[in-house]
Amino acid sequence: MATTHIVEFELQEDLAELIANNEEITFDDYNVKKQILETKIGTLLEVEKEIGSFTKIISIKEVNEELLKSAFV
Amino acid sequence: MVRVEYSHRFLCDSDFLDWLSKQSDREQLLSHLMHIKSSSKYHRGEHNIILESEEKECNEILKIDRKYLGGAFKSEEDPLFLSVHNEQISKNIIFAIYLTHFKPYACILLTSPTKEKSYKANQHYNKIKRVVVLSGEEAKKLINDYFRAFINAREKERM
């Protein structure tokens, strides 16, 4: 089955709410879930997801100026 | 949840993005725009918009990675009612006016200092107050002000 990769930008609390309300959100690595829940409220995250039938959260990164240095080509 | 009732939505054009990519504090400005888009009380994820027709126009010159551009401005398909307009400036003004039909009932049209005059001279921009064309340092100041509002709201949530 082909899977679709997407990248979205969400505040920590919106992602935490998604996880709490949608049991079809999964993780390859429990540490990613732990990392999300331990991140401070109001932190903007770059969220890499994979959609097959369930949605898998692959990784998160905090959006900051350091990360955005790669945004300009 | 960190939600801010921003006074205006943002609509930008390709000239603004070109201007943005040439600023020394471009990473900071892009980050601020991404935070604003994600924290809007009424339009989370859709507060900052760019029309698809405008985005296509800047394909050649755009120096911002598409992934991060999407994080700062949601690309919106041109509604059918814009097809009667040939000029991109008119499309942007009419769409900015359309955005004022929804909360917070006001829109900032972000462009470059060189393009600002063309917007202000456009017949559709005549006498309207709910759409404001901004560029350069004024645009930068507003984006920074909005980001400060986000930081204040976040501090309250974290207390």
Image (cartoon, coloured by chain):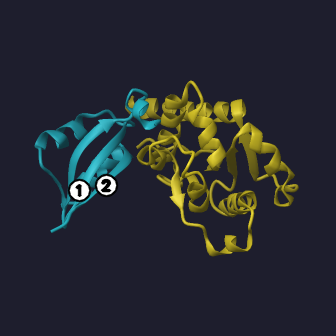
Q: Amino acid at mark 1?
A: Glu
The quarter of the picture where residue B125 lies is bottom right
Q: Does residue B95 lie above or below B135 as drawn? A: below
Q: Residues within 10 Å of mark 2 (few under 14, many from 20)?
A: few
Q: Considering depth in this image, is B141 or B23 the residue closer to the camera?
A: B23
Q: Is residue B131 above or below residue B4?
A: below
Circle on res. A6: 2
Q: Are marks 2 and 1 on the same chain?
A: yes
Amino acid type of the residue that numbered disc 2 sits on in the rendered structure: Ile
Chain of the residue under the numbered disc 1 shown in the image: A
- Relative side of B71 to B83, left or right: left
Task: Please identify the residue farthest to the front as the structure is shown.
Answer: B60
Q: Residue at x 24, y 40 (%)?
A: A36
Q: Secondary structure at mark 2?
A: strand
Q: Position of residue B6 (x, y in %)?
A: 60, 44
Residue A34 numbered mark, or none: none
The residue drawn where x is 58% and y is 51% is B58
Residue at position x 44%, y 29% from top? Answer: B155
Pointer 2 or 1: first along the chain: 2
User: Which tint was used for chain A?
Assistant: cyan
Q: Is residue B119 visible?
A: yes
Q: What is chain B's hue in the picture?
A: yellow
Could you tell me residue B128's position as x and y percent? 83, 55
Q: Nearer the viewer, residue A4 or A58?
A: A4
Quarter of the figure that contains the N terminus of chain B? top left
Give the residue at x 62% y 32%: B145
Q: Which mark is residue A50?
A: 1
Indicate the quadrant where residue B122 lies.
bottom right
